[in-house]
Image (tube, helix red, strand yellow):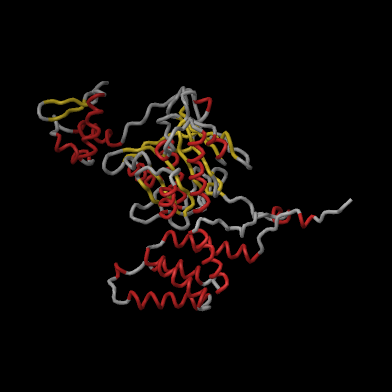
Amino acid sequence: MSISHASENILPFRTTKEQKVQEIYDEFSRVYRTVSPEVQRYASRFLAIAARAGVEGEQLSKELWEHRDIIENDREPYEKTDKAEVGRLARVLAKLDWNIAEEILALQADKALGITRETGGLLDLKTNQDLLNLPPMNWVIEGILPEKSLVVMYGPPKQYKSFIVQAMAWSISHGCNWLGHPTEEGAVFYIAGEGEWGMSKRYRAWLQKHSLPTNAFFPFYSYGRSINLANEMEADALIQSVPEGTKLIVIDTLNRCMEGDENSAADMRAFVSGCDRVKEETGATVLIVHHSGKDTAKGMRGSSALLGAVDVAISVEKDKDNDEFVTIKNPDMKDYEEFPPITLRGEEIELEDGDTSLVFGITEYRTTDRKPKPMPPAQTKILNALQTADGPVRPKNIPLLADISRASWDKHRPKLLEQGKIRREGEGYIIVNNE
């Protein structure tokens, strides 16, 4: 009986050197995709210098800055390349030697020709020791959203899904806890496929509720149109637009970012493939907002190919007996325990312009002793002003007397009239005493 050597029957895995080349290549590619065309030209030039002239590491980085200063010396400040972009490129160049630069040029050439050799033509295998030493899972939102995962949040229409997802997104971009869960601070890219209308007042209400400034920059970016993620060119545009350090990409909604039939497994797989590509190339968690079917007990709408592909599934639904309450459930969490149901209740926040929006917080669910909604502060001020007035008050004087804005008066007047709390008398308004 012949003895076969195990080494002849297994696939080799990447060496440490190959891994290093791949890591620097990936980093170089990420920088290249997200910088201006001029910085891209700097990148190509100095990669070639490293490969062919043998200039290495820190010296290469230093020469990049000198070259930029010479080229852009006479330009106006607004015409110069972004120093932050040049700095990102300089940090990658500092890691090069001529050998690695040659390998990266070769990988770029292969990609241009449609040749894939990211693993040198070999499978990227891990040993048993590699598996034992894998780092623990990191979370974008602890216990809720794992990093670099594909997540779907679904529910019937008008169940406040966007309110909840946007609060998650703002918590990450501001480095705040979300409902008591720590977040991994970083940039968020929000695809508002159904439009950005309404997001502004929700954001202002959220900032007000959390006592955060409105005049400071935080890395939250929105795009108010749909993107077909099954289309390679549109997915490329998205990947190139995502800022470095992005932790979360939100697709709101699936229906607006998918072409084809939701019930078709082939069309759904094409959409999921685009989402996976975005996730892999950006390193961000991708959260898809989706709808459930007519029978909510059967879960999300469309092909089951989506449920089979996601790492986390989260459902959102109002309570049937009391629609003030919304419950978030976690029917599926791959590799980790599902989080317990979270019951939320919206708090109406009045904004400076008299508009209002909801901010959701954790609450105890109660089916009895349902309390009426409190009267908005602006309505209380209007009634108090009319109560103390000597006779009817002209409409133009009411905002001044009540210490509210004209917009707030215009908003609340119809509601007070409809509820019978005020009425028109002559050229002004009076309070109606229903006691």
Up-down relation of residue 126 to residue 363 (above or below): below
Residue occupying the far right of the picture: 1
Residue 84, can we see it? no
**Quadrant where the C terminus lies?**
top left
Give the residue drawn at x 43%, y 31%: 159
Above or below residue 59? Residue 174 is above
Question: Could you tell whether 135 is left or right of 104 in the image?
Answer: right
Q: Pick the residue in front: 107 or 185.
A: 107
Residue 376's quadrant in the figure? top left
Foreground residue, 254 or 155? 254
Q: Residue at x 27, y 39 (%)?
A: 354
- Position of residue 200 measured from the top left corner of the image (x, y, whole percent): 33, 44
Query: Is residue 352 something one can see in this rendering?
Result: yes
Q: Quadrant of residue 120?
A: bottom right
Q: Which residue is pictured at 27% across the width and 33% down the height?
A: 379
Q: Position of residue 129 (x, y in %)?
A: 73, 56
- Please tell me whether residue 364 is drawn above or below residue 149 in the rendered image: above
Considering every residue shown, the one lying at the far top of the view is: 435
Report x, y in % for residue 185: 49, 54
- Residue 128 x/y as whole percent: 73, 53
**Left or right side of 357 for 60:** right
